[in-house]
Image: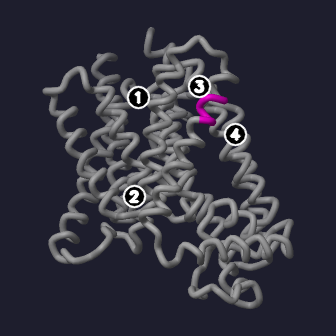
Amino acid sequence: MEINEANRLQWLLAAATNLYLFFLCSTKWNAGYSISGGILAVLILWFYLKKRKKFQCASRLFFTVYGIFMAGVLLASCLTGDKPSIHVAQKFLSYSVPMWLLYLILQQVHSIRQASLPGMVIGSWVLLGASVRELWTSPGKDRLYGSFASANNFAMVLEAILPFLWMQVWALRKNKKSPAFLLTLITSIGLTGCLLLSASRGGIAGFLLGFVGVVILKGIQKTTWGLKKRVGVLLLTGCLAAGALFAATLRYQHRSYDSERLLLLQSAYAMWQDNKLYGVGFQRWNQVYRSGYILPGAKEPTLSLPHNNIANFFSGTGVLGGTGYLLFTFGSLGVLLCTLQKHPANEYARMMFWVWIAIFVHGIVDNSLYAKFNTRLYFAMWGIFLAASLDSRKERLKK
């Protein structure tokens, strides 16, 4: 009886988690996202209150830099006194909720793959369906938007999903005839095609550099080098690959607004210089930009944010939010590298390393950590990685 009850509970956890990931990945139906998230929250409360489960910390460093980042963004926005900017900051904090839900619920499941892959794959087919429909109804468009306002936003969502799917393809490769492998492979190929058709230079560069980073990392892990030498070689080869890819992009894919983005960086820096502590506020950025910081050569006065993550957080939330962003970005990278040093075969750590590179690289030329859907998915991947990296979970499964 106890075994049957445990199996039913595992089935319930997997079904609820996959349902949530389906709505999260498909980026459709806000009501479905909220309801499925509520179901997970109820299950988490039941586990931690009725079953008296204790909170387990996968990484103190990660949660510390995450807390500093979120607190900095919220505090800076409050100090501006601008209610719309405070509201935007609160929404930004809410985009990290998927990380907490998945981190807490996936600690209790026996198989993270069974509790996440079906939902991610089925949700991805919604994105594929929207893309096929767009290609069919608007065959002459230069770029694929999916169901998003811009091709770049579509690319950011794909950057968070594709590393997860491709790492699952790699993990399932030994059983190539299984439906799970074939369906995940087809989905991965389809979404990779969508990313290429989006023609998002930052998105494609981030995705490719992330893949290169994972390949280099796997080669380095086979050596007997120490952690410092491994990190040094990884950074050096990564910088060389990034430089070559960006040079090729600028040479063959130059666009008319490239110079505009350089002007935006100059304006954002000037805005930060005059508002160093807490910035101008997210929602007031365009208003302040047009009031005295727009440069003569700029042709897009309606832009609401600079196309760069660092410039966005420093100009919008000052030293408080900008420093928090840098601490979170590079602190979380440190967590990934230490995990990969300790557990080289952790497929979810490799996945998150790929996602980190993709979002960071894209964030050099766009705001890759700001919009709702891609930010939710980015933090969701962190939740999956953190749950998979818990040593206590691994020990419990062994028993």
Q: Vertically, is 169 above or below 65? A: above
Pointer 1 residue: 109
Which one is closest to the eye, mark 2 or mark 3? 3
Secondary structure under the numbered disc 1 in the rendered image: loop
According to the image, label 4 marks what residue?
A: 331
Task: Please report the residue visible at 27 percent of the width from the left and 54 percent of the height from the top.
Answer: 193
Q: Name the colour scheme.
A: one colour
Q: Residue at x 37, y 34 (%)?
A: 167
- Horizontal side, residue 278 vs residue 1: left or right: right
Quadrant placement of the C terminus: top left
Residue 33 image label: 2
Kind of residue at disc 3 = Thr
Confirm whether the magenta stretch covers residue 233: yes
Residue at mark 3: 339
| Segment colored magenta | 232-236
Nearer the observer, disc 3 or disc 1?
A: 3
Is there a contact, CB below 8 Å, between mark 2 and mark 3? no
